[in-house]
Image: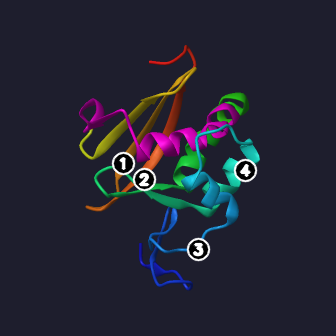
């Protein structure tokens, strides 16, 4: 991150501007602060292209951006769309997780966030970007029901 945002001077990273007062589109504002709900794959793609950061319970900024979008798009179209539809659930999982596992599967700096919803479970996995920033690189709904 070396480029500065012309709007507020924050650093621009994989998930857009890191400044906490950055003014996002209405779409992204709704994804960041709204109740978990399904969205269209098109809206998820637009939001991830714009990029945004939310805070985890420890106060770290956790980014959702182009790295996540590239990973989702590497899956089959049907699987990618299913994951994108659940983007708001993944954001909610990071901001208010039921469980957090540091150094997930022995990978230093990797964090697993999990949460159960009414009909499925959600996992979001991030990687450390710096001491205060993480970037989500995958989101995985548990299609077999809630965990």
Provide the secondary structure element on which disc 2 rests: strand
Q: In this figure, which residue is indicated by the disc labeled 3?
A: 23
Residue 141 colored in magenta in the image: no
Between residue 98 and residue 122, name the one nearer to us: 98
Q: In this figure, which residue is indicated by the disc labeled 1?
A: 127
Q: Residue at x 61, y 37 (%)?
A: 86
Question: Which is more foreground, mark 4 or mark 3?
Answer: 3
Q: Earlier in the sequence, mark 4 or mark 3?
A: 3
Asked if 141 appears above or below 71 in the picture, the reply is: above
| Image quadrant occupied by the N terminus | bottom left
In three-dimensional space, the C-alpha distance between marks 4 and 1, rounded to whole angstroms, equals 24 Å
Q: Earlier in the sequence, mark 4 or mark 2?
A: 4
Q: Earlier in the sequence, mark 1 or mark 3?
A: 3
Q: Which mark is residue 7?
A: none
Check whether the beta carbons of the residues at disc 1 and disc 2 lie within 8 A of each other: yes
Q: Which mark is residue 43?
A: 4
Check whether the beta carbons of the residues at disc 4 and disc 1 lie within 8 A of each other: no
Q: Dot 3 surroundings within 10 Å: few (below 14), some, or many (20 or more)?
A: few
In three-dimensional space, the C-alpha distance between marks 3 and 2, rounded to whole angstroms, equals 20 Å
Q: How is the image coloured?
A: rainbow
Provide the secondary structure element on which disc 1 rests: strand
Q: Which residue, as the protein is rendered here, is positioned at the far top?
A: 144
Q: In this figure, which residue is indicated by the disc labeled 2?
A: 135
Q: Earlier in the sequence, mark 4 or mark 1?
A: 4
Check whether the beta carbons of the residues at disc 1 and disc 3 lie within 8 A of each other: no
In three-dimensional space, the C-alpha distance between marks 1 and 3, rounded to whole angstroms, equals 25 Å
């Amino acid at each position: 991150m070396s480029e500065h945002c012309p709007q507020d001077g924050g650093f621009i990273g994989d998930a857009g501007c890191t400044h906490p007062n950055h003014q996002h589109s209405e779409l992204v504002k709704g994804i960041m602060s709204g109740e978990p709900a399904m969205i269209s794959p098109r809206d998820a793609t637009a939001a991830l292209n714009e990029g945004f950061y939310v805070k985890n319970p420890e106060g770290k900024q956790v980014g959702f951006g182009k790295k996540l979008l590239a990973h989702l798009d590497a899956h089959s179209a049907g699987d990618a769309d299913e994951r994108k539809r659940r983007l708001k659930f993944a954001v909610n999982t990071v901001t208010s997780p039921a469980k957090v596992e540091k150094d997930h599967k022995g990978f230093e700096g990797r964090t697993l966030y999990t949460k159960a919803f009414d009909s499925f479970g959600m996992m979001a996995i991030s990687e450390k970007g710096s001491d205060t920033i993480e970037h989500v690189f995958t989101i995985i709904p548990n299609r077999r029901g809630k965990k």
